[in-house]
Amino acid sequence: MSFVPGQPVTAVVERVEIQKLRQGENLILGFSIGGGIDQDPGQNPFSEDKSDKGIYVTRISPKGPADLAGLKIGDKIMQVNGWDMTMVTHDQARKKLTKKREDVVRLLVTRKSLEEAVKQSKGCYHKP
Amino acid sequence: MKQERRDRHRSKNRDGSIRGEKSVVIQAPGESLLDADSPREDDRDDNWGETTTVVTGTSVDSISNEDLTQLSKDSEDSSALECRRYISPALGAILGFVSLITPLAFLALPQLLWRDSLDPCGTPCEGLYISLAFKLLILLISTWALFLRPPRATLPRFFVFRCLLLALVFLFVASYWLFYGVRVLEPRETDYRGIVGYAASLVDALLFIQYLALVLLEVRHLQPAFSLKVVRSTDGVSRFYNVGHLSIQRAAVWVLDQYYSDFPVYNPALLNLPKSILTKKMSAFKVYNLGEDNSTNNSTGQSRAMIAAAARRRDNSHNEYYYEEAEVERKVRKRKARLVVAVEEAFTHIKRHQQEDAVISSPKHPREVMDPREAAQAIFAPMARAMQKYLRATRQQTYHSMESIISHLQFCITHNMTPKAFLERYLVPGPTLQYLDSNRGRQWTLVSEEPVTASLRQGHVFSLKRLDLSLIVTATPLPFLHIAEEFIDPKSHKFVMKLQSETSV
């Protein structure tokens, strides 16, 4: 998941679909995000590369919509409903997730275990 | 039937046409009440001529009783004023003089009267003499410094503390003399050292009384306790001052001192609303009364109705006021610009003449050497017109005569001032003190509901009146302050970069 500026990013992603839950006047998703191009990437506990300024999931409320959809803590969000999340500010990311007119957000998330899983499956092929 | 209906229609139409002519019949409310009162008024009107007595003015030759009493009252007042101005310092001076020579008298009298029978008194007496001498000297100097100052104001009532102190000193000195007379003069006391000690104690006590006087008269009111708001009634200029515990009359004197140096001079020519707007307000619309002709009864009713109608009508005078103000400001700014340029140019015409130049200047162009007065007159001419127009635009022309402008110009040239410094006197309306002629005293009247010797308290309101304006003073106590302490360790100033902000979605 290292990011080289100017080079396309390749990642193994998982598609997560979260139904927003209505709580009073707000639609909530049940998780917290951290990161963004205007934040300090060195503070991110979940990133491999401490210069990664992507959006990460920092907390999941138990039994919330995100938890039920299979989102895990430490996931890096690559896309939200088609909007890119790898080069956005923190506030832009929040806005894309909390649009009032959308009931459903479809996220593309990536995590280290996915890479491992793909590598393992790839490696299986190569094993004689 | 149809005829009637047509008649009714026609009458309705006639009413409608009347309304179309834009005249209004206003039935004023409360007319019935007036009707009940009016016959009584009429009766009173009829009998007025018989029962009133008319006081005619006196002829030129005779002088009425009223005039006499007026004259005597005037002379009394003026003489009383003059006397009162000097009574207090005179009393104080007499008492002070008496109290200062009393110790010397105490020492001198036994020596003069029964010198032979006195006990000889050696070194201790001399020591006491020296201390007495120095204490008297200190008393003299401090009395001169503190009390022998010309009074700045005459107050309407007695100054309580000063009277108290004078009474105290008088009592004190009198009791000392009494004791002296009974115990020393009568039996011809021989113990001279005791007498010297007695005189020394008198001087000590006088020093303490002077300390008391200092505290009561000068020091007590230095610590601020009240905030006075002073508002001028004519144009609303207001200031806030902090004073200590004073009586109302002393606070009035203090406020007036500050008034003369803080408040800009009152210019009656600067009205609130320009005349054009005020006169327009007067021309309200006319009221036609198409009812019966009870004009006298309807007068109050009519005025009330007019006021009500005027209030209901849309009032555009604020619009005119706004534009008028903008216009006046623009005119003043234009004239000010012209004035500044003219003065700057005028100041470039003269230069201070140095002594060395006298040698250098060639015989072909002999420079005329002028003294400041002539120089001022020389450069006044090009700026006179611009100055006149500016003063007229800001309505200050009554305060500055041509003579005063030239003398101010002379003053500025003598002290090497720039044109801007010369102009500051005219661009900003200065404090009232600047325009006073300090020869005559100022007559102010103190109007107060509380007695004027009462000490200031919260909510006291008093006013100082003069012929054309009055100052209204309100006293509020200064708030009691709770000051708490917080200690900050200088090592505790630490900073970190902002952590990744976490937003829950």
Image (tube, rainbow, N blue to C red):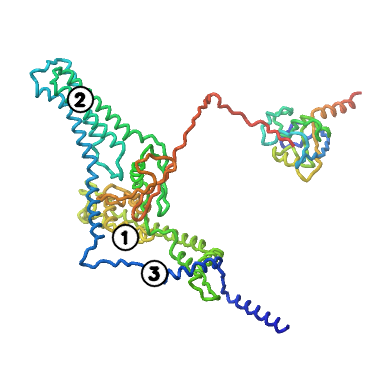
Q: Which residue is mark 1?
A: B384
Say if residue B22 shows up in the picture.
yes
Q: Is residue A122 above or below residue B448?
A: above
Image mark for residue B264: none
Q: Nearer the viewer, mark 2 or mark 3?
A: 3
Q: Is residue A115 above or below residue B45?
A: above
Q: Chain of mark 1?
A: B
**Element type where label 2 sits in the image:** helix
Q: Chain of mark 2?
A: B
The quadrant of the rendering that contains the C terminus of chain B is top right
**Element type where label 3 sits in the image:** helix
Q: Which of disc 3 and disc 2 is earlier in sequence?
A: 3
Say if residue B420 shows up in the picture.
no
The quadrant of the rendering that contains the N terminus of chain B is bottom right
Report the front residue among A91 and B260: B260
Q: Are marks 2 and 3 in contact (CB under 8 Å)?
A: no
Q: Which residue is mark 2?
A: B179
Q: Nearer the viewer, mark 2 or mark 1?
A: 2
Separation of marks 2 and 1 at Cα, in angstroms = 77 Å
| Amino acid type at mark 1 | Ala
Residue located 51% across and 61% down the image: B318
Position of residue B189 measured from the top left corner of the image (x, y, whole percent):
14, 19
Q: Which of disc 1 and disc 2 is earlier in sequence?
A: 2
Residue located 56% across and 66% down the image: B29
Label 2 environment density (alpha carbons within 10 Å; few <14, some 14–19, many ≥20): few
Q: Quadrant of residue A62?
A: top right
Report the front residue among B38 and B240: B38
Q: Are marks 3 and 1 in contact (CB under 8 Å)?
A: no
Q: Which residue is mark 3?
A: B48
